Image (tube, helix red, strand yellow):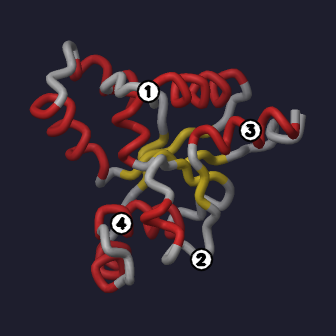
Amino acid sequence: MWMKNMVKIFFDTDVCLDFLAFRQPFHEKMDEVIGYAAMNEQRCMISECCIPNLIYILSNTYNVDNFEKRLMNWIEGCDIISTDESVILKAIQSPFSDKEDACQYYTALYNNINLFFITRNKKDYERCATVLPIYTPLEFLEICNNKC
């Protein structure tokens, strides 16, 4: 199977929220991505800077029942990767209009996430993301279905 080698899948904050807050109609595709990753022993990664955003949004915006347990399970199933000062400064100085997106992108680059960066917010990355390819959950699943 082509993806059996150690594939790294980085999840942007928006797709984490889709999954954790059951946001429709997006939750189902993320559920499929997570299932595929688990079944094929892929490494799911999130940035440490997305955790406070997830805590705040899940508890205050979406009022997700048992968000603490759901978030803890999510964190336990992912590798949390670091964002250091150089990454934050690069994000602030970047041409990205959404600096949180820039922080996610440069965190993935800094940590050598070199295969799949998954976001539903692809348009915000297209102009600035020149090194790391960006995929939506649907595109990721289509690639998996075509290669397996």
Q: From the viewer's perspective, is 39 left or right of 13?
A: right
Query: Which residue position holds label 3?
Result: 142
Which of pointers 2 and 3 indicates the residue nearer the eye?
3
Q: Which of the numbered marks, if any, corresponds to residue 36?
A: none
N-term mark: 3 or 1: 1
Which residue is pictured at 48% across the width and 28% down the height? 77
Where does the image place residue 101, in percent across and percent down from the top left? 37, 62
Mark 3 Cα-neighbour bin, 10 Å: few <14, some 14–19, many ≥20: few
Say which residue label 2 marks: 130
Marks 2 and 1, the one that precedes in the sequence:
1
Amino acid marked by disc 3: Glu
The amino acid marked with disc number 4 is Cys
- Residue drawn at x 23%, y 21% is 67
Marked residue nearer the N-terminal end (3 or 4): 4
Residue beneath the point at 48% across and 66% down: 125
Residue under the point 67% across and 26% down: 36
- Pinpoint residue 94: horizontal percent, then vertical percent: 37, 82
Helix, strand or loop under label 3:
helix
Q: Quadrant of residue 24?
A: top left
For marks 3 and 4, give the one nearer the viewer: 3
Tell me which amino acid carries mark 2. Thr
Q: Quadrant of the C terminus?
A: top right
Query: In this rendering, would 56 be left or right of 77?
Result: left
Q: Residues within 10 Å of mark 4 (few under 14, many from 20)?
A: many
Picture disc at residue 103:
4
Q: Tell me if label 2 and label 4 are in contact, CB under 8 Å.
A: no
Q: Is residue 114 rendered to the left or right of residue 124?
A: right
How far apart are the alpha carbons under marks 2 and 4?
A: 15 Å
